[in-house]
Image (cartoon, grey):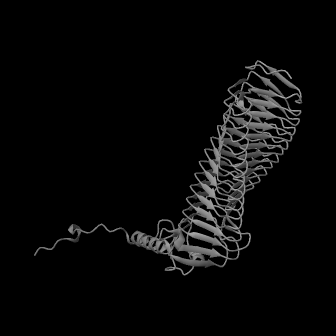
């Protein structure tokens, strides 16, 4: 057999030995590194109690971006968990009621930064004047959770760096507010149910500015929503009902915006604005409240645009003690007491409003009340469309008062006013036409361009 020279043998093309060993060691090191990073983003979650018996231990070992999955059960924390990264806490069953996290010493979770996520858990704070969540920074997401705190609040959002997203959660049975946003804190609250809290359902103070959308706020022992001390907030498509306090309370330069909200069945009033409070209310329905649908006093100056105030058990709108207010295109009807009451230097403006089918007056202005009605339609009320007396002074321009079951405009007992370009028709008192009723004891009354003309007195 002929021998093949070594030079002609086929030799595999191995790399040089030093380089080969380097690559092998590098791959091995990477494998070991990955094996030691359990709980990091992309790896299997840390399971409680399987991997770690307590949530605290899992939290101490999870990497940023990791997930802590919690099986059904009740877990007691010995301290607040301060979260400032992107960790996810999730109940594995998908039902918040089956995973209960309790803390008796302080806030349950404090979020200071990052974008952590909490979902499908019940958070129960039993410490006095503490909260289920205390958010001072970051953009945490709280999804499908239940927040309850017998001696404190549901969630406190504080500071301009705090901007949580709270989605489809319940804040209930809290000893304090369900939600409190303070000191320029923000927050987005979507499709949440906030109910049976001992204080306000939502409290916004000190320039807090949350966005609240499609939430229900009900059965609280205080106001549904309170906004004060330059607090703001945007409330859209919310239902606020059956609260023992006022549905919405605004004072001390609070200036929220409510759009397409319903405020009803309150055991007190629907909306109260006082102490220089402001507020924009647009396309809201305010109805069936035990006290006035809207009450304004002490230099409160809200704006209501195209709102409906109806079926109240008291007056529709009550403005007094130097309260102001602008009402544009609103409808005020079927209230048990006068549609509008103005007294004690209250001075609102009504433009393009309808006030009708009241069980008493359309509007009564007395006890030094003021006010302006422009281009309004006032009709089918059981008592005078407008009554002015007791040193009140009213301006009525371009209004249509008709089909009343009493006088159209009734002025007496030092009542005064300026009435111009108004149309009065089909107003009957005791079966007799009574568009105007100006008594001899009325104060100074001026009229021009009215149909029919205002009688002299």
Where residue 77 sits: x, y (%)?
63, 77
Residue closest to the far left: 1
The residue shown at (63%, 57%) is 217
Residue 340 on image: x %, y %: 74, 39
| Residue at 77% over, 19% down | 453
User: Where the C terminus falls, by quadrant?
Assistant: top right
Q: Nearer the viewer, residue 275 or 60?
A: 275
In the image, is 330 to the left or to the right of 93? right
Residue furthest to the front in view is 431
Say whether residue 98 is left or right of residue 394: left
**Front residue of this view, candidates 406 and 109:** 406
Q: Nearer the viewer, residue 106 or 51?
A: 106
Q: Is residue 53 above or below residue 266?
A: below
- When asked about the image quadrant of residue 356, the answer is top right
Picture quarter containing residue 268?
Answer: bottom right
Q: Position of residue 371 (x, y in %)?
A: 80, 34
Residue 255 appears in the picture as rendered: no
Question: Where residue 45 sits: x, y (%)?
Answer: 49, 71
Classify residue 305 as left or right of residue 371: left
Front one among 453 and 281: 453
Residue at point 55%, 59% (across, down): 168
All told, the count of numbered labels is 0
Where the N terminus falls, by quadrant?
A: bottom left
The answer to whether any part of residue 189 appears in the image is yes
């Amino acid at each position: 057999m002929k021998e093949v020279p070594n030079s002609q043998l086929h030799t595999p093309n191995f790399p040089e030995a030093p380089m080969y060993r380097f690559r092998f060691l590098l791959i091995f090191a990477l494998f070991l590194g990955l094996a030691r990073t359990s709980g990091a983003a992309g790896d299997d979650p840390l399971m409680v109690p399987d991997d770690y018996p307590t949530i605290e231990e899992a939290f101490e070992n999870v990497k940023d971006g990791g997930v802590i999955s919690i099986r059904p059960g009740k877990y007691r924390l010995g301290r607040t968990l301060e979260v400032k990264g992107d960790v996810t806490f999730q109940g594995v069953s998908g039902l918040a009621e089956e995973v209960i996290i309790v803390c008796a010493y302080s806030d349950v979770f404090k979020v200071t930064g990052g974008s952590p996520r909490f979902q499908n858990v019940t958070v129960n704070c039993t410490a006095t004047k503490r909260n289920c969540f205390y958010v001072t920074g970051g953009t945490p997401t709280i999804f499908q959770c239940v927040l309850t705190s017998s001696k404190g609040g549901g969630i406190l959002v504080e500071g301009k760096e705090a901007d949580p997203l709270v989605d489809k959660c319940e804040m209930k049975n809290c000893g304090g507010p369900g939600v409190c946003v303070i000191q320029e804190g923000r927050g987005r609250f979507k499709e949440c149910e906030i109910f049976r809290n001992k204080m306000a359902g939502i409290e916004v103070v000190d320039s807090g500015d949350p966005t609240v959308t499609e939430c229900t706020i009900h059965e609280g022992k205080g106001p549904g929503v309170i906004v004060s001390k330059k607090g703001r907030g945007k409330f859209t498509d919310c239902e606020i009902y059956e609260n023992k306090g006022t549905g919405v309370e605004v004072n001390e330069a609070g200036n929220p915006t409510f759009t397409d909200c319903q405020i009803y069945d309150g055991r007190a009033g629907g909306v109260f604005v006082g102490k220089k409070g402001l507020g924009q209310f647009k396309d809201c329905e305010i109805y069936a409240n035990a006290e006035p649908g809207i009450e304004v006093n002490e230099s409160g100056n809200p704006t209501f645009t195209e709102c409906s105030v109806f079926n109240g058990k008291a007056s529709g709108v009550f403005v007094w003690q130097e309260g102001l207010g602008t009402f544009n295109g609103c409808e005020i009807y079927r209230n048990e007491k006068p549609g509008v009451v103005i007294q004690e230097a209250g001075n609102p403006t009504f433009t393009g409003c309808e006030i009708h089918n009241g069980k008493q007056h359309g509007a009564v202005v007395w006890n030094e009340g003021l006010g302006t009605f422009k281009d309004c339609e006032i009709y089918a009320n059981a008592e005078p469309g407008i009554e002015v007396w007791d040193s009140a002074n009213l301006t009525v321009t371009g209004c249509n008062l008709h089909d009343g079951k009493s006088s159209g405009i009734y002025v007496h007992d030092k009542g005064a006013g300026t009435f111009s370009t108004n149309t009065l028709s089909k107003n009957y008192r005791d079966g007799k036409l009574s568009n105007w009723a100006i008594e001899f004891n009325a104060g100074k009354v001026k009229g021009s361009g009215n149909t029919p003309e205002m009688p002299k007195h």
